[in-house]
Amino acid sequence: MLKITSGVHRGRLIQSLPGTSTRPTTERLRQAWLNSLQMSLPDARVLDLFSGSGALGLEALSRGAAEVVFVEENPKAVKVILDNAKLLGLTEQVKVIARKVEQVLPLLSQEPPFDFVFMDPPYDQSYEPKLLGEWPWSELLIDGGRLCVESAHRKEGSYAAPAGLEIVRDERYGDSQLTFYRRNTA
């Protein structure tokens, strides 16, 4: 079980997937991540890639986000996200795309741009450089929108900013690196 750390659902417990097939973002890191975005979350549209239990996106909704689009390929995790959204009374604000992240770009390109994109991929599969380098972030994010990436801590630092984005925060939390990129305003 995971706990929502702040907002209207503060203290509420949500399900997580048993076993080691997903690696939930720790409560400390989730809190640091979302505390830094708190003032911008009300009414925001959020895209949560590699959603797992949905804890990050559900935390954003608890803190005032208007809508979260979750992308998760694991059918068991999709069920957990939907169950958690129902438990918290958030089903109207949740959309789940049950596909691999590599397959969703055509669907996401039909969506209005997002205020935030959360990306917490498996640490050992090198998704970060591929997605950072190949996805059209300037089309997926509003002007000033943020791409927030949790990755394994790297001695050489964060991944380079994609075209049209700049690094605005880059911090280590134990074995994790939290990097925020902001879309440059036109």
Image (spheres, helix red, strand yellow):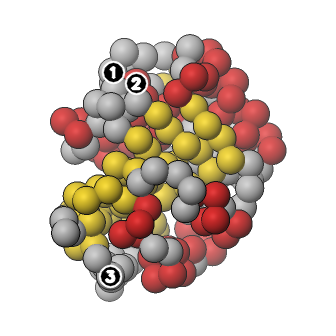
Which residue is tagged 2?
Answer: 62
Q: Quadrant of the C terminus?
A: bottom left
Residue mark closest to the camera, 3 vs 1: 3
| Residue 134 sits above or below residue 38 on the image | below
Q: In screen coordinates, is 136 left or right of 37? A: right
- Distance from disc 3 to disc 1, alpha carbons, whole Å, reads 34 Å
Residue 111 in the image: state x and y as whole percent: 53, 51
Most foreground residue, 93 or 77: 93
In the image, which disc is placed on residue 163?
Answer: 3
Who comes first in sequence, dot 3 or dot 1? 1
Which residue is tagged 1?
Answer: 7
Q: Secondary structure at mark 3?
A: loop
Residue mark closest to the camera, 3 vs 2: 3
Residue 68 in the image: state x and y as whole percent: 50, 38
Most foreground residue, 138 or 94: 138
Residue visible at 22% across and 44% down in the picture: 36
| Residue 98 sits above or below residue 81 on the image | below
